[in-house]
Image (cartoon, rainbow, N blue to C red):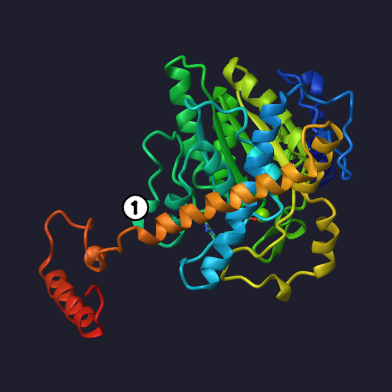
Amino acid sequence: MAAHNQNDKKTTSSEEVISPITPSSMDTAPIDLGHIEVLQILNEHGEVDAGLEPEIGHDRLLEVYRAMVLARVFDKRMMTMQRQGRMGTFAPNLGQEACIIGQVTSLTEKDWFAPSYRSFGAQIMRGWPMEHLMRLWAGFHDGFPPPSNVNDLPFSIVIGSHALPAVGIGMGMKYKKKNDCVVVNYGDGASSQGAVSEALNFAAVYKAPIVFICENNGWAISTPTSKQSANEILAAHGTAHGIPSIRVDGNDILAMMCATKEATDRARNGGGPTFIEAITFRMSLHTTADDPTVYRDESEVEKWESRCPIVRFETYLKNKGVLETDSIERILASCEEEVLRARDTFYKMPDADATEIFDHLYETFPKELHEQRAEYMQRLKQKGVGE
Ligand SMILES: Cc1ncc(C[n+]2csc(CCOP(=O)(O)OP(=O)(O)O)c2C)c(N)n1
Ligand SMILES: [Mg+2]
């Protein structure tokens, strides 16, 4: 349609007649931009669409449920520790547990995961010890590199910047004829970054084995999705690049698991990338430095409370006879115990060497920095730091 309009304008400004571009005059078939499927398997009351229900063993269902609960317990503990002055900052993921856990359930240890900063639930599931993540958020540089047995990129703070390296990892897998794939996630805000468009385009053209998860949680700090993109259907970014794309209820764990499984199967089978727009909501603040009450209406948050992904999954598991009320309490207690154990391990970890801020910059240390380091150490001594 856009092409027709453009040509119409040209004919009115001159006598020259330009024949309109029609699909039949193109070499390749046009992509159907109008049809983007929406997937929901568990409705807001936790009732399952029997026609879409996946066959997942009870043990696996419970494992996934526990991962969601653990993510929430970790989240709450980290918020408390930050408010106690024991964390640098933290980006909570309250209410997005289905979205984050569901996107890694079909990954193997050989696959790669390229996360943004709100992804600790998936990182824990991928094998990051929780004390390692605590170290990271407390600002110790040894917390940042992924554990050696985990194929993850360090999480990206420069939003969207990790999409290109993620595609590069996928291309490496392709060249080496591996059967593996990559999952990369980023938010509605990051979706406006140029690097993300480049990544989508490259992956689509070269059929990289990658799954793009766009976590549309309604907000990019104080910018709502409506101000981020004139087309709020962000899955259209995928379709526009010729990538099979779908919108998924991101608070529905079964939908997230199924959509990601189909996408990772496609990637492994040489079908190239998939774009999943996961529709969810950031229930809490952006990070501990933020106060959302100054820019968003509380009623919006209340609306999403009834869509809690954990409660919804619990209802499903109860109806299925997989979970009972006392096992809910037991699972919660064991997650709390696990998080507290990690916290205690974290507290026993060594302090940073305060002079390290001067290291790793120069091969040959400049004279001025020698002086600055000496002065800095003198000041630390005066303040009693490191004694
Ligand atoms: C390139 C870049 N620009 C700006 C920022 C500052 N910033 C940090 S988070 C953020 C919002 C990101 O929102 P979104 O992508 O929707 O992710 P969410 O925080 O909602 O999970 C911005 C603008 C940044 N980190 N990187
Ligand atoms: Mg967002």
Q: Residue 17 location in percent, x, y?
A: 82, 33
Residue at 59 percent of width and 33 percent of height:
201
> Could you tell me which residue is drawn at 50 percent across and 47 percent down?
161
Q: Quadrant of residue 323?
A: top right
The answer to whether 371 appears left or right of 324 in the picture is left
Q: Is residue 231 above or below residue 114?
A: below
Residue highlighted by disc 1 = 142
Q: Position of residue 325 (x, y in %)?
A: 79, 45
Residue lying farthest front? 326
Quadrant for ligand 1 reads bottom right
Res 159 seen here: no
* Residue 346 sits in quarter: bottom left
Observer-nearest residue: 297 or 344? 344
Q: Position of residue 65 (x, y in %)?
A: 69, 39
Q: Quadrant of the N terminus?
A: top right
Does residue 310 appear in the picture of this structure?
yes
Query: Could you tell me the amino acid type at mark 1?
Result: Asp
Numbered disc 1: secondary structure = helix
Name the residue located 72 percent from the left edge and 42 percent from the top edge: 327
> Is 75 left or right of 343, judged from the image as shown?
right
Q: Residues within 10 Å of mark 1 (few under 14, many from 20)?
A: few
Which residue is rendered at x = 71% and y = 23% of the image? 57
